[in-house]
Structures are given as C-alpha cells and as structure tokens.
Amino acid sequence: MTMTPHTAPQVRLLPLVAALASGLLLATAAQASSHREAPSITGTPKVDATDFYMFSSYEPNRTGYVTLIADYLPLQDPYGGPNYFSMDPNALYEIHIDNNGDAKEDITFAFRFQNTLKGTALPIGGKNVPIPLIQSGTVSDPRAATLNLNESFTLEVVRGDRRGGTRAAVTQASGGATRFDKPVDNIGAKTIADYAAYAGKHIYTVTVPGCAQPARVFVGQRKDPFAVNLGTIFDLVNAPVGVITDPANINAGRDDLANKNVTSLALEVHRSCLTAGAEPVIGGWTTASLRQGSLLDPAPAKGHGTAAKSGGAWTQVSRLGMPLVNEVVIGLPDKDRFNASKPKDDAQFADYVTHPTLPALLEVVLPAAGAAPKNLPRTDLVTTFLTGIAGVNQPAGVVPSEMLRLNTSTPPTPEAQQNRLGLAGGDAAGYPNGRRLRDDVVDISLVAVMGGLCMLNGDANALKLGADCKPANVPLGATSLRLHDAVDQARVTLLPSFPYADTPLPGSR
C-alpha cells in the first residue's frame, strides 16, 4: 500500500519523505499558490503570477521533453466581459532557467504581447459607428474576421543575463513567422461553439535558436488547475480541527477556484535545450516586469489601452518559483521586495525560513495552543529547501536560492499512475522534483510545516533532517501526518496532452 500523509508511514518510503523536505518545509498550510500575494501586485493583476509548473512531459511519444507553464492574471470570472482578460502589452513576461546551480538565469524565455483593435463598425443611419464588443459574430479560427480585437505575442530566447544576454526570436517551424496568435477568451458557446478545437489551432510547433529539437508553445486562457478552499482558509482557517485532521473529510471543503479561469504561458522544450553539460538538474522561476514609469493621459487617443504612457527601464514586479512562498511565508513588509528580488539575493529572507511564523499563527487560529514545532531555528529547512535534495534534484555546486528544481533525467510517470502526493507518495517524478498540475502541494506542505517530517525523522535523525527534528519537538505528534485542506487536488480535470490545463469555462453555457 502506498503511504499518504494520512496513514502510518512505511519504512521503505522514508527516504522519499525525507526528499520531500526541499520544497515543502518552507511552504504553508492550505493556500492558493500565488493569488494576490503582495500589496503592490493587487493593483496590477495582469502581471500577477499565480502558479509555475515544471515537469517532464508525460504525454505519449514526448519522452525527453520538459513542460514549463507560467499562469498569470488570477481569479478570472468566465462572464467577465465585455473586455475579458487580455495580457498587458506594456509588460514583459519571462520564464527563467538556471542550468548550472549558480542561482542566476542561463536561459530566459521572454513573452511580449500586442493587442490590435480592428475598429469594427456598423452602418447606423448613414454613419459607421464602432461597436462596443470585441466580437461581431461567431469565431472558430485564429484572427477571425469577426474578432474586433486580436491578441498576439512574440517570444524570444535570451542566453545569459536576462537584460544583457544574447537575444534571438523563437519562430514558427512552418514559415518562420515571429508573431503568434493568442485565442480570444472563452466568451461563450454562441460566440465559440467548440472552444477546445479553436484553442487547439493556437498550439504552435516552433524553432528555438540554438536548439536542435522543435518545441511547442501555447498562450491562452485555461481553467485554473489549482484547487484550494480560499475563503475558509483566509478567514483564520474557519474550519473545525476535526475536519482537517480526518482523512475521511479530504473532499469536505469547497474549491473556490472551481469556477475560475487563468491565462497560461505554456512551453514544451526538449531537455537537451535546457540542460548544460552532464548536469541533468534545472531550476526555474517566472517573473513579470513593467516599465519604470507610467503617465496617465487626461485625453486618451482613440484605440485600445491608450490611457497610460509607459517608459523607462524594465522593473520586476512579480516572481514565482516554488508555490506558496511569498503568499504566506514572506512577512507583509517584505512581500513587494520579494517580488522584485532575484534568487541570488535570497539570503535576505532567511529569517522567514529559520523562524517561520505560520505554525505560530495556526496555534492561535485553529485554536491549537502549543502546536508549533519546537526545533528552532529550523536551519534544516533552509538547507533542504534552498539547495534541492541530494541524489534527487540537487545540482552539483549549488548556490542556495529559492526556485523550482527538476531532475530532467527522472522518467515521467504516466498520468494514470501519478500520485498526487509526489515524492511522499512514492512518485519520483512529482513535487518537489518539479511540479505537475496534479501534485497536491497544499496537503504535502501542511504536513511538513507542522512537523510531520520530524515525526518520521525519529530520535536517531534517520532522515538527516537535524538532531532537533524529532518527535519530542512535534507537539501535534502523529496528527501532523493527517493534516489536509479538505480539497483534493487530484480531482481537478486535466487534458492528457500539452498544454495539459483544461479548456476554460465559458462565459455562457
């Protein structure tokens, strides 16, 4: 029987549980990955990164490929017209890869967007008057004549420093075009009768300069694949302790993202194009940047999005690697600072790891007096989280830094055999060895942050998590192994192939 956090541990799985520490001990209890996680980002939702996924592709016949998915613009209501959720043409969206462990980007995929207003007009009483909608009829193909607003993007690969490195355009494999169409959001069944087929026409096979293997790219609206009981959790965990400690109640809660969409920037690139030399481990994170200055025009010109004029240097305003970090680990005074930071400078945030506040907060709100683990400072968490796991996803000569890490030599697990608990469930291709859409990072993190791994580490430091990481320092005892958020990530519906996240919910059905 496979071990879960809700059952007694089996000795043969202890090494896997130990491996789990790298991505989990810094994480949190039952939160959304990165929705509205910092004060400043709430004012610019178009550049708010919600989730970052990086995993070996498990679609049949795609062996050797790695999928990178950066989700932005959270909490999209399907009915959110008439302007829906276009990306920001004044922003720079990037996915960074560190392939030598030095905490600096070696490869960056940079996305820029353009919104083109067609100015569709109707003859009204002898005058041609522009319509107020982004569509004038049904849509089934890219750049349909009935689309009043066409959204497109360019993609560049940057080698070396993201700003000073060598840049080259990613092109369509057929024809060599450098611009790609983005599907309009799922307005509804009358406008787009078969959205899955329509969106599928926007999956491009592309050529990445410097890469011998073709890649694929898709950018567009998706059903948000993350599942979490958001309202209840942020209302001081407004749930009975008996519910979140009873495995029978794993589906008792409400997934507040079940009716939300998100925008995905998805890439599938061969691992040989991402790794360096003999090192199979890559680190990844996503960022978004805005121009340093913006001025409001008191008399905007006709067009689309003309109210502001932007200029100056690119300024990073969003950052996301491992899930949950900025949302509930980083303290409120440093959240904007973290969003603007780079992995190489992560030592400035060490106190939030060695002396995490979340366990103490849970003591108060559950209530569960004295429930926080006592092994402070939690330097074991710093070591395992910031370096990856030796023998699993730790690169040689690693510089400690926060990012998602994936061992590209680990074979992918077929979808039907995937365990939502990743390494803890005996699935070597799962979180924290990268992150797949089905990995239940919330439940895994709850167990870890409240001392579950120290229960397994035992008095003899069997898992090498530190001598103070032992059962005597875990007030919750075995209960720490049964914690969950009452929402099952494994129940989220996904596609069996790229871009994996499901068709977005329509504005009308």
Image (cartoon, helix red, strand yellow):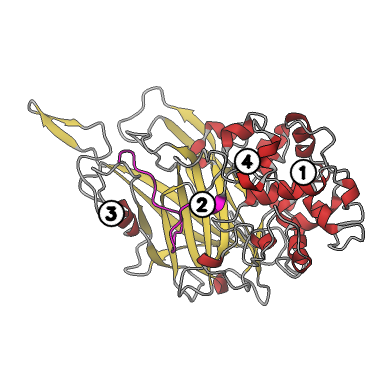
Q: Which is more N-terminal, label 4 or label 3?
A: 4
Residue 323 in view (yes/no):
no
Identity, as a three-letter code, of the amino acid under mark 4:
Gln
The quadrant of the rendering that contains the N terminus is bottom right
Q: Quadrant of the C terminus?
A: top left
Q: Secondary structure at mark 1?
A: helix
Q: Nearer the viewer, mark 3 or mark 4?
A: 4
Q: Which residue is mark 2?
A: 491
Q: Which residue is mark 3?
A: 142
Q: Is residue 106 above or below residue 501?
A: below
Distance of mark 1 from mark 4, alpha carbons?
Answer: 20 Å
Judging from the image, what secondary structure is the residue with disc 2 in? helix
Q: Tag 2 or tag 4, which sits nearer the N-term? A: 4
Q: Pointer 2: residues within 10 angstroms few (<14), some, or many (20+)?
A: few
**Residue highlighted by disc 4:** 31
* Labels 1 & 3 near each other (Cβ < 8 A): no
Work out whether mark 1 precedes mark 2 in sequence or the reverse, and give the earlier one.
1
Whichever of callouts 3 and 2 sits on the residue coming sooner in the sequence is 3
Q: Identify the mark nearer the N-term, 1 or 4.
A: 4
